[in-house]
Image: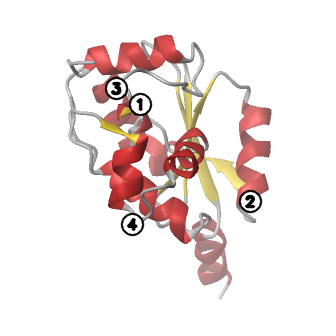
Amino acid sequence: MPEAQSVSNLLSTIAIGKLSSSPIGPLWIAVTTHGLVRVEWDMSVAEFINLVSTTHAAPVIYDDSRTSSALQQLSEYLQGTRRQFTIPLDLASLTSFQCRVLQLTAQIPYGQTLTYKDLAVQVGKPKAARAVGRVEATNPIPLVIPCHRVLGSDGSLHGYGGPGGIKLKAWLLDLEHSAV
């Protein structure tokens, strides 16, 4: 019985891992047994653990074995050798509207863009472009859910929460050879 309990305890943890070196700096990720829940950069391990703990009521552990696949895919993407992620995502902590917007965002093909208004129309709320923008601004899984591919209605770059803001968004679009 103790062995079954320890397996159960491991499965209920949030595993974190770090990509120490990338063109945009060190990245932290967090995964549950269901998939990737968080991608962040420009923060300490204590800040990242605190952030993950605020949205997920489970112990947080550093676990290379559970995070290695996602970290490898992020590394490949940032090196320009991966165009599509195959990482399972865990959006259970989000509202249904947030999930729908982010699922649609995840479907924007590599190298292409949509506007906030386009996504609002796709989600069935054509006047909700600002609400869509708020969802994108709070996307917990940037890069994998490519909120950088979402532009203002005028086709220009509008805000980006990553370090460097719009410059990083432009760099990511350039990496993908997007016409903006």
Residue highlighted by disc 4: 124
Q: Callout 1, which amino acid?
A: His
Residue 39, how many percent across, how many down? 54, 39
Q: Earlier in the sequence, mark 3 or mark 2?
A: 2
Between circles 1 and 4, the one closer to the viewer is 4
Residue highlighted by disc 1: 148
Q: Is residue 65 visible?
A: yes
Pointers 4 and 3 in contact (C-beta within 8 Å): no
Coloring scheme used: secondary structure
Cα gap from disc 3 to disc 2, whole angstroms: 42 Å
Q: Is residue 91 visible?
A: no
Q: Callout 4, which amino acid?
A: Gly
Pointers 1 and 3 in contact (C-beta within 8 Å): no
Q: Callout 3, which amino acid?
A: Gly
Q: Callout 2, which amino acid?
A: Pro
Q: Earlier in the sequence, mark 1 or mark 4?
A: 4
Residue 140, how many percent across, how many down? 57, 46
Q: Earlier in the sequence, mark 4 or mark 3?
A: 4
Q: Where 168 falls versus 155 (above or below)? A: above
- Disc 1 packing (10 Å; few <14; some 14–19; many ≥20): many
Residue highlighted by disc 2: 59
- Disc 3 packing (10 Å; few <14; some 14–19; many ≥20): few
Residue highlighted by disc 3: 155
Name the element at disc 2: loop
